[in-house]
Image (cartoon, rainbow, N blue to C red):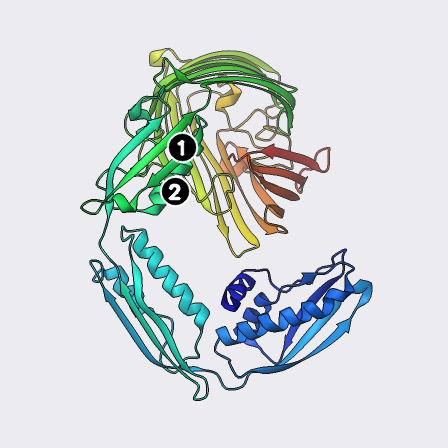
Amino acid sequence: MRRGLLLAGLGASLLYCGVADADDVHFLVDGVSGPLAEKLAHALPFVVIGSQADRLEETEMSASLRLKDALEAYGYYSAHWTERREKGAHGKYLIIFSVTLGRPILVRKIDLKSAGAGHNLPALQKLFTQFPLHKEDILDQITYEEWKGKVLSFLNARGYAHADYSRHEIRMDRDQFWADIYLWLNTGPRFHFGDIKITGAEHYPRWFIQRYLSFKTGDWYSPKALALTQSNLRNADRFSDISVTSDLDKAKNDAIPVTVDLKSMSAQHLKIGAGYSTNIGPNAAVIYDNYNAFDQAQHVRVSILAAQLNRNASVTYSWPVGAHLRSEYIAQASYQNQNLTAYNSNEILASAGRQWSLRNENSLSNSATIEALINSEKANYNVAGQFNNSFYIYPSVQYSMQDFRDILRPIAGYILTARVEGASKVWGSDANFVRFSAQGEWRKRLSRNWVLGTRAKLGAMWLTGPISELPPNLRFFAGGQNSLPGYAYQSQGPFAVDGAVEGGRLLAVGGFDIQRFVTKDWAVVAFYDVGNAFNSWSSFHALQDVGLGVRWYSPVGPIRFDLAHPLVAPQAPAVRIAFSVGFSL
């Protein structure tokens, strides 16, 4: 029980040094330095006792027991200490443990063995060579237990579902200060997936549901694959009750059967909402979805958006093809009216094509796709005081990849999208052009509380003729929440003769941010951005902004609220608000 309390304590936060409203008790370990001091601090998180002063003695006694467990877990069975209590302002208490470590328990003998079908796996043998304890080391039972768990997780992920230790024993003589370690591993047989039975959700074709499975019959058994399948089905927005289970007791010839039991949601959804987006202002939206058109899992979406700066109506029809998620045919049509700082435009766009999945592992958070479309666009627009009409037919190819541990909590991973498109007068377009654009974001969790993020947008275009022949959506502009949030949306770029922004042939924008979590789901962030749209590197004029913000990682995805200030060519307002819901580039 004590060891369990210790492990729970070690997972708690570092010694708290902030100010709480209620009375609380903090702990300090004196006489110990280095990594051991940090480990002991983890085992002694602060305790809130409110106004119940009678709990102070009980709290002190409990902390003393946790300290004893922690010291023994790290090999110091003969340690002793004295305690003293100090009372600060506002009912704060500090309990100081002055510790004398004494002589530690040293490892005298290590007996590691492996047996079973997988005992000769090179990766397993490498793990054995990396056993963290050696002769004459101080006995660290926490590291020992972590290594044991790591080995079992490694084997379970590779089909060795019955892997276990036939002997896991630490024999210790506390009077002589030595310990012998006996750790004998048996991998057991290697299992693979057997028959897969799908029940429920009768209105969906079985081949379509199988696309959400991250395994197939004959693959090596993996609990991770079961969990990923459960996640894929949950994120499909088509099923209300989901159960993905395997039955080890019914395994035959090392094949484990799997049952996928589903209950369908209503295939037709109607969503009505109102909100606010920094880029387009106050808005209202109506979205109709049919996720199972013709009982063939084909998806129809009709979307109408009315916003202060943007009106949009669109219809998208997609039907799945092939064995992998995100492989589908696509047809879409839309009308958009924009009244932005730099331009006004009306665009009618129709597209049709195919998207291919490039990864065998079916995952909605880890994917790579190629999309090929034929686009037809008719537009009229007013940019920099020039009115124009255009018509274009142009093919486009887009490559996208993303790998996040959790797309609803994108704090570790990356996303990248690159697109190339081009038009020619030969097939009826108003001008010849080739256009390339790319954008990406990378995030790394530096520690439990800190996350570093970087992002970039790049673009380049070859065009025969003046840029006025292109509609605004094919030119490059900078500004807005996912570009330069200190400047208005799509408001920055090279200037026309009259001094108004007309958009450019090149784009380079980048930035970074650092997040500090203050609770599990809330973080504060500081960020910096630099870049602009331009026509040549010799005329490149870099804009910059800085800002502070808040992130809430809610059940529906990250909610962002930022305050951004332009550093170059400031424009009113001096501080711009940027707000969004969900993850997007």
Of pointers 1 and 2, the one earlier in the residue sequence? 2
Q: Amino acid at mark 1?
A: Leu
Whether 19 is drawn above or below 296: the answer is: below
Q: Amino acid at mark 2?
A: Ala
Place of residue 316 in the rendered image (x, y in percent of width and height, measured from the top left):
44, 17
Whether 335 is drawn above or below 89: the answer is: above
Most extreme residue toward the bottom, as rendered?
176
Residue 517 shows in this picture: yes
Residue 545 shows in this picture: no
Most extreme residue toward the left, as rendered?
253
| Crowd tier of the residue under label 2, counting other residues whose Cα lies within 10 Å: few below 14, some 14–19, many 20 or above | some
Residue found 57% across the figure and 30% down from its top: 494
In front of the other: 241 or 269: 241
| Crowd tier of the residue under label 1, counting other residues whose Cα lies within 10 Å: few below 14, some 14–19, many 20 or above | many
CA–CA distance in space, label 1 to label 2: 10 Å
Give the secondary structure at mark 2.
helix
Determine which residue is flagged by label 2: 227
Residue found 51% across the figure and 34% down from its top: 584
Place of residue 36 in the rendered image (x, y in percent of width and height, measured from the top left):
53, 74
In front of the other: 312 or 535: 312
The number of callouts visible is 2
Determine which residue is flagged by label 1: 233
Most extreme residue toward the right, as rendered?
90
Q: Is residue 235 left or right of residue 128?
A: right
Residue found 26% across the figure and 59% down from its top: 187
**Disc number at residue 42?**
none
Q: Is residue 6 left or right of residue 323?
A: right
Residue found 38% across the figure and 25% down from its top: 421
Give the secondary structure at mark 1.
helix
Q: Is residue 482 left or right of residue 321?
A: right
Place of residue 213 in the rendered image (x, y in percent of width and height, measured from the top left):
32, 35
